[in-house]
Image: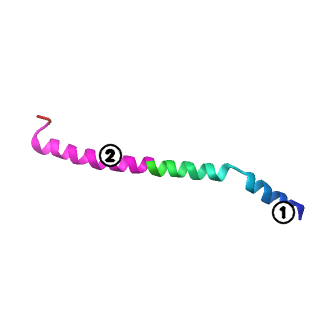
Amino acid sequence: MSKLINGFKQFGSDEDAPTMVEYGMLVVVIALIVVIAAALLGTAASGWFTTGGLS
């Protein structure tokens, strides 16, 4: 019985799970930034090619 209780105590004090969640959230935010930037730059690049450049 004490093994089970010690296991729960260790699980409660383990900090790996919250760290993984934080990294996951960071990955999601970075992915959103990349998608938004790609969409904006893709539209701008399309305009550059159809109008003949930057001039």
The number of numbered discs placed on residues in the rendered structure image is: 2
Residue tagged 1: 4
Which stretch did the figure color magenta? 30-53
Horizontal side, residue 12 vs residue 25: left or right = right
- Farthest residue to the right: give it: 2
The image quadrant that residue 6 belongs to is bottom right
Direction top: furthest residue: 55
Colour style of the rendered protein structure: rainbow
Q: Which secondary structure dominates the residues rendered in magenta?
A: helix
Query: Looking at the picture, which amino acid does disc 2 mark?
Result: Ala
Task: Indicate whether residue 40 is drawn in magenta.
Answer: yes
The residue nearer to you, when weighing 13 against 49, is 13
Callout 1, which amino acid?
Leu
Residue 36 badge:
none
Residue found at x 35% / y 50%: 35
Q: CA distance from mark 2 to mark 1?
A: 50 Å
Task: Please tell me whether residue 21 belongs to the stretch shown in magenta.
Answer: no
For marks 2 and 1, the one nearer the N-term is 1
Q: Quadrant of residue 51?
A: top left
Mark 1 lies on a secondary structure that is: helix
Q: Provide the residue designation for mark 2.
A: 37
Question: For mark 1, does the 10 Å Cα neighbourhood hold few (<14), some (14 to 19), or many (20 or more) residues?
Answer: few
- Could you tell me which residue is drawn at 89 percent across and 61 percent down? 2
SS for dot 2: helix
Residue 41 appears at what percent x and percent y? Answer: 26, 44
Q: Residue at x 84, y 61 (%)?
A: 5
The quarter in which the N terminus is drawn is bottom right
Quarter of the figure that contains the C terminus: top left
Instruction: Tell me residue 47's x, y (percent).
Output: 16, 45
Query: Does 40 sit left or right of 33 as displayed?
Result: left
Crowd rating for badge 2 (residues with CA inside 10 Å; few <14, some 14–19, many 20+): few
